[in-house]
Amino acid sequence: MTSLNPALLFLLAGVLLPLLPSATRRHCVLIVPLVGMLLLCLTPYGSYGQGDIFGLQMVSYRLDKLAFVWALIFHIAAVIGAIYAFHLKDPVQQVAALIYQGAAIGAVLAGDLLTLFIWWELTAIASVFLIWARRTDRAYRVGMRYLIIQVGSGVILLTGVLLQLHTTGSLAFEHIGLGSLASWFIFVAFGIKCAFPFLHNWLQDAYPEATVTGTVILSAFTTKLAVYALARGFAGTEILIWIGATMTAFPILFAVIENDLRRVLSYSLNNQLGFMVVGIGIGTELSLNGTAAHAFSHILYKALLFMAMGAVLYRVKTIKASELGGLYKSMPWTTVFCIIGSMSISAFPLFSGFISKSMILTAVAEQHYTWVWLVLLLASAGVMDHSGIKIPFFAFFAHDSGKRCDEAPLNMLIAMGIAAFLCIAIGIYPDALYAILPYTVDYVPYTTTHVITQLQLLMFSALAFAVLFLSGLYPPEIKSVNLDTDWFYRVAAVHVLTPLTNAAKKSTAAVFGTTDRLAQFSLNRMNDWVGPKAWLTRTVDSSGMVALVLGSLLVFLLVYLF
Amino acid sequence: MSHNPDDKNWWLDNPANIKLIIGALAVTCAALFIADFLYHKHGHFGFEQWPGFYAWYGFLSYCAIVLTAKQLRKFIGRDESYYETEDSDTSNEIPSMEDEQRANDPAARGEDA
């Protein structure tokens, strides 16, 4: 019984959820991940749910140390998300959240590539409803763009999986490594969901447009699933080091000048993924442990930051930095929780980021990638700006906007409190997290050198902020949007393609004009004979119909008798 | 705030206290810089041994990032309605239990204003 796949529990509950009354639904959304977590923790490592389909070995539930870390943090994120969204009545969001979370857990526990593909696509389809639940035209269009890219990633994955089956004859999801054509397809599919540079913009486009609670849930699963898949399939692939280093650096520039604070956090998410990707590329036990640990702590502090910004959006009805400021007076608890999230992501000693990110940096240094190490260190100073200072400073302090509101609802505060507690608990007692990492941990985060150098980096970054802000050099928060790679498909492609489609329409009209007219003529004649008012299909009253039926029965009887 | 007489006096509203915080930050930074001379630093790279390497690197990286981003804005910054006329803060989410309670409770609405 304990080998029941928790993903199936989420799926079943998600399907049955709409049948429950709204007061029960929100409890169900909370209980399911708790039960799932219990099931997960009671299950010994091994492979379950195995079967043969067309002679192919399928393993729908494979639990080992690597999968366990991700499955566990996904369950924790689901619990926190359920508490944060406890006030919701919207069944669409509740169902979407459960199925999305279940699909992500199912994908992490998948032992073969075909099962992975099925869950992979389901995460895309379920999650888009967390965007559409905002019920605006804007959200509809964003959701469509998001869905096309996410499903596209799945189609590329399926192509890769089938090619892989063709070349190796196996569907097993183990180390793949770059080489064959199949591996490249799989790599790109993972890369899209992991928001690699130039494939990244779906993330910053879509996440800030989801509902208040939807963004919190979205932030935890899709991208970290991709990190897991890369860690499983492409550990030690050197190109990931360069991709990851780029990912840590360039989103920072966008985060600094972005006005929508939830979009700032989306860029920041992208930057944090970069650290994990570098860890995968290095591929040593320390770096892979670092990636797993960083994914774990990242999900918590990133959810915490998104929760704090969600609470601001929920209460103030805007999340633009240019409109906010001085909210610490109205939302003191949210402010404190947000600062804890900021200190965690900036990797202050005693907070979770400190004990996880440093594993990756140390692994990079041990392998003597000097330039990569310098980029990661620069990115760490950048994190201090956009997530450590900008988010709390412009929302809660800075220039007082004069806006006054209530503190966030109690359920949101509880969810933020739990996440904040875990951020600090991991920071103070890292051994608890180190104990569940894939490899034995031989790493001590709290050394004099590490604490002092990290504090130097962060405090001098803060000093730089103070200098720039007071001297007026810091870029002001202004109402604006910034172009990113989405410009190519939202504007450039439209401009290029519109004349082409118009020309295509014209030429087809010229070529098929005669046949079109012929077809139209035939349609019109058809309409005359059997259209709505035509004599063959005219509606006559029911007594006529009854008479017709009776008459035909009579004819039948007469024919039968004689 | 002055335009809201019910507001109490907040510690951070006093400019002297802001100066106090910045002073504390400067003192902390100075202390951290000096700390570099008082212990044996373990590092992987030679340049980590330079006095205050992390301090310099943090300060300069931070300035470089922020000032580069500021210039970047000139190239990629657009008006808010560049892509969409509908505001990004608009939402037609189904009202939550919390929303319904507040709608039925005039006191809660009053505080909101």
Image: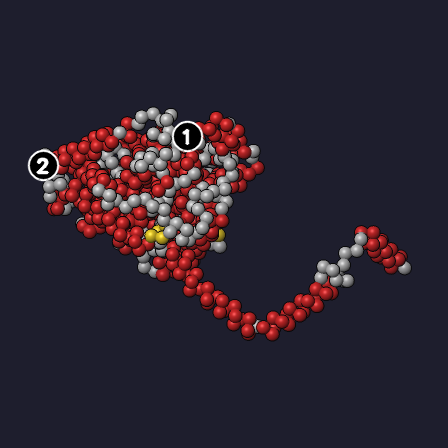
Residue at 52% x, 70% y is: A506
Q: Report if residue A155 is visible in the image.
A: yes
Q: Where A488 sits versus A503, above or below? A: above
**Mark number displayed over residue A362:** none
Chain identity of mark 2: B
Chain identity of mark 1: A
Q: Position of residue A230 (x, y in %)?
A: 34, 50
Q: Residues within 10 Å of mark 2 (few under 14, many from 20)?
A: few
For the residues labelled 2 and 1, the Cα–Cα distance comes to 49 Å
Residue at 40% x, 46% y is: A207
Q: Residues within 10 Å of mark 1 (few under 14, many from 20)?
A: some
Residue at 38% x, 51% y is: B79
Is A396 situated left or right of A547 in this image? left
The secondary element bearing badge 2 is classed as loop
The secondary element bearing badge 1 is classed as loop
Location of mark 2 (residue): B37
Q: Position of residue A335 (x, y in %)?
A: 34, 32
Which amino acid lies under the numbered mark 1 shown in the image of this protein? Asp
Which amino acid lies under the numbered mark 2 shown in the image of this protein? Phe
Is B98 situated left or right of A284 in this image? right
Which of the two residues, A228 or A300, is positioned nearer the viewer here?
A300
Which of the two residues, A41 or A156, is positioned nearer the viewer here?
A156
Which of the two residues, A287 or A133, is positioned nearer the viewer here?
A133
**Mark number displayed over residue A406:** 1
Quadrant in which the C terminus of chain B appears: top left
Q: Position of residue B18 (x, y in %)?
A: 24, 32
Q: Where B34 sits versus A106, above or below? A: above
Residue at 42% x, 62% y is: A495
